[in-house]
Amino acid sequence: MTRMGFVVDLERCVGCQACVIACKAENGTPPEIHWMRVLEEEIGTYPNARRSFTPVRCNHCANAPCVEACPTGAVVKRADGIVYIDSTVCVGTMACLTACPYYVPVRFDGGEGYFDELTPYEETKYAAFREGTAQKCDFCYQRVDSGRPPACVEACPADALGFGDLDDPDSAIVRQLHRRRHFRPREELGTDPSVYYLVGDGGGSVGGMHRGGLA
Amino acid sequence: MPTFVRGRDTTEQTVPRPGATRHERAGADWVPTTCRMCLVACQVLVRVEDGRIVNVIGDPDAPKNRGRMCAKGKSGILTHYNRSRVTRPLRRTNPDKGIGIDPRWEGISWDEAIDTISAKLRKVVSEDPRRLYMQTWADGDFAGWIGALASVVGTPYHQTGISGTCGKTIHTINYLTAGGWWDEVDFAHCNYLIDVGTQQGIATREGFNHSVPDCASARVDRGMKLVVVDPVGNNAAAKADEWLPIRPGTDAAFGLGMLNVLLNEARIYDAPYLQRHTNAPYLLAADGRYVRDEQSGKPLVFDVSSGTAKAHDDPSLAVPALEGEFPVHGIAAKPAFQLLKERAAEYPLERVERITTIPAERIRRIAREFGEAAQIGSTITIDGVELPYRPVALSWCRGPQGHKHAWHHTWALQLVNVVVGCINVPGGAQSRSTAIEWPDVTWPAVGQDGMMVPGGHTGKHATAFPGRPATRPRRMDLFELFPAAAHTRTFVPEVSRDPGRYGITDRTEMLIHTAGNQLAGGWGDVDAVADWYKSIDLVVGFAIEINETHELDDIVLPMTTYLEESAFESQDAVCGEGVAFHAIQQRVVAPPDGVREQIDVIMEVYERAGLLDDVYVALNRVLKLKPPYLLEAGRRYTHEDVLDRQARSMYGEEHGWDWFKEHGVLVWERSVEARYPGRFIKGRIPVYMENFIDRAQELAVVLADMRVEWDLSDYDPLPEWMPCQAYGSLERGEIDAIGVHYKLPYVYGGQGNANPWIDELCEKLPQSYGVLINTRLAARLGIADDDWVVIRSPVRTARVRARVTECVHPQVIGIAGHAGHWAGGKARTKGKGVNFNSLLPYDLEHLDLLSTAVDMCAPLTVRKA
């Protein structure tokens, strides 16, 4: 079996937002819509305070609430686990939006793009969108099918993003999961997400000096 | 001929990227070119469909970024398709010129624009060419086309940087201590990195898309320790093992504290390196000057082994003394290193803590860890060559070099690298382009007093050693009064306030500038700077969109975006990497009707001004053309033609412009010696700036003659911490905080904020448009998160949103990005954030009298609005 998934290395991520804009450049998402986001939070108290960066996108759950909720079958789960929305089938019930515990799907409400008129780039990209339908990260499945990585993974300057077959014991990401501590987002909800976040072991171990303060 | 590297094995990439070579790429229409969304200039592949740009990805063949791309680069698509783009020449019709005043542009024809410009150019050149001033910045070849005019007509005024801190000490100090242009870290081997006022490896700096993954691997896979010393808990601090919040303007004290621990307490330093490769053993007399051999004039060192003084290059010199006092020529002479130790001893850590607010014990521990991690004396073998192994680096840049005493902050910090011997060796602080092997060969050489003289492109960058004896100035930037500075553009508006005070009669009648926001980003108080622009008869600017600088122009010329423009550029390398390379920029799509490539425009301007033939002759040198590809007077060339000549001149018949257009980048192997040149450099580097004594004395004589009084204390051969005006105001409670500017990775480089994708990010992320105020300071002032506040500096008042946070020093207001726009072409970001530079007092008290850096400590009071 194939099960496509992502890893996100929270130690490597530097919060540069390259993945966010790479996704936007690849897919031409309209204003206010980001299929990929990097959340920023502050933790700790001065001077032991820091910001944290968490890249989030669709988790392509094996037990996806959006797939189950969609009445028209527009939300499709492929055999390899990738979940995408077919906008030619979607009629805009937004059941997926309501069902998703991660707040991932968004509705495209039309509009003129980022300027007063669509740029040639936006004209090309918006041809794929239908007003009133839902949209979300589609794992860049067209790229993946032609042997290329998703746009976010390809762009990431920190090499913090990885993807691959979670069911293949020899795949790079499975080998990473064996080596590193990790968690999946809100696993307790039973969604069986296909995104794994790698966390730190406490870097900076040169000469036995371990990371002080926050984990 | 070197070994060329064709294509790269995709298994080298952590992430498989589309195709190893040009021909395996998915889809035929991926055009290789260079991104210009910031100064890093990564190589990209641009996807074109039906004449439209539909995607941009990193070029996996390019060593600079190896297929990776950042948010700024990706957003370039909408900068290219910017709907507020200037698409035809404009002339102002409003004679009243100033900040916030509508120029009332009218469209004119190219003919009229070029006629006006060339006529003025002809006039100025024939009457007094020194009335011509040119401003360029990171403009690929175009800077060379403009700059060629300087030598042709005889004007010294070619300004090649914008920011008031750009290159002010990073280049001078890199040339001085490392022979190269800027610093990068050898992340392949580094185990301990201290970032001081920079976000090297995390969020900023040249080679960003290269250094970030290598730094991540060093941190996460190898356990490299990252310490960040910064007033702001920025992206680098977020990834650091330790963040040391520091009060702004105190980096010299931090550096001297580190030196005190290393040299005096722990006694960890690379003695053999200091003895042989620096002027540490050079003997000094009581007046601070070298003790010299009476016959040869060479500086002397004391050989402990023979008990006698010898010339520094005496082959019998066995053990040069680093410490002590020795009788030589009847005087008590001390090695320079002894004086450095004594200066460092004036900075006990309790004192450093009072100045910096960093706890003494933390500094002590960090300095010891750094010293131990340096593994002084160890070696590593790379490609069969044994090299010193010093896996530590202290990287600094924007923060410490943006100060009234920029030289001293950064000199103190760089000396930490020098004393552990980690410069240009595996694991340590690298310098870019120290050694070039092909096609030109440039290596540092031995100069005066046995000191290193950098090779390469210093022809256009004056050096701090030996420096230039001061003379009465003729130049509006007072270049003659700055013996150790490479460029002094920061002084131009100051001098133009009262040129007579300095005896300057030069004035500017015509200014040509390329796209770049010189007004908003180049100095401080923008009102003071605008006055200079207003005094110029004809200001001509090239523009993508109208920014704050253009609103003071008389004529604005549209220009091609970087996706429409070609440039040959110059060769490049990433520090420590086994390859060097040359990447080009090429036209991906044609510009809209009415828009012409800058170089075509300037050729026509020169032709109508009767200068083109002479410019061709100058360009032969500037563009490094060789026979049979030289440009000849009387002939006319297209830009493509010139590009082909550039390519063939540099790389031979096999690598003409067509080859480069197809492949994008030429890559060849470098030797280990060129990658890690540290111990192969023959000349010594300074730990003591002995030449400053003479340069200061010469300068004092000239200033006295001019009846100008300047405080020349900065010409101290040893580093010292000196407070700036903001520091004093803060101590006396006259201000609430010092405002500092810091960088965000998605706007760094200045191309960002008005781009709609970037602006949208800035709206959604908490840090970007708000100013950071520490929770404690906010509580004291009754300010809550997201409140509107009024921040007031001596020159400007601004209304901004407060971002109450734990991630900033309690005496600091943190201001990021390039916001606070007011120009017509920046409507999207009008009224958002604040233009940081406009807060800065701009006068002699806020300019470094050694490096000419602008003091970037903004003295602020803060109130709830």
Image: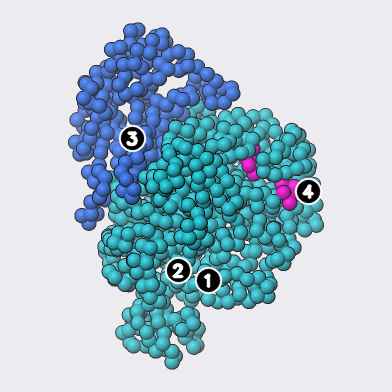
Chain colours: A blue, B cyan
Please state which of residues B512 and B777 is positioned toward the viewer in this rendering: B777
Q: Nearer the viewer, mark 1 or mark 4?
A: 1
**Is residue A194 at all visible to an observer of this figure?**
yes
Instruction: Quickly name the residue at label 3.
Output: A54
The chain under label 3 reads: A
Q: Is residue B117 above or below residue B125?
A: above
Instruction: Quickly name the residue at label 2.
Output: B720
Instruction: Quickly name the residue at label 1.
Output: B713
For the residues bearing labels 1 and 2, Cβ distance under 8 angstroms: yes
Residues at marks 1 and 3, common chain?
no
Give, as a three-letter code, the residue at label 4: Lys
Report, in whole angstroms, how far the alpha carbon at label 1 lies from the one at label 3.
48 Å
Give, as a three-letter code, the residue at label 2: Glu
For the residues bearing labels 3 and 4, Cβ distance under 8 angstroms: no
Q: Is residue B620 above or below residue A192?
A: below
What's the magenta region?
B534-549
Q: Nearer the viewer, mark 3 or mark 2?
A: 2
The chain under label 2 reads: B
Instruction: Quickly name the residue at label 4.
Output: B120
Give, as a three-letter code, the residue at label 1: Ser
Residue drawn 42% across the image and 17% down it:
A107
| Disc with the residue nearer the chain's start (1 vs 4) | 4
Q: Position of residue B407 (x, y in %)?
A: 49, 63
Q: Position of residue B547 (x, y in %)?
A: 62, 40
Q: Nearer the viewer, mark 3 or mark 4?
A: 3
Q: Secondary structure at mark 2?
A: loop
Q: Nearer the viewer, mark 1 or mark 3?
A: 1
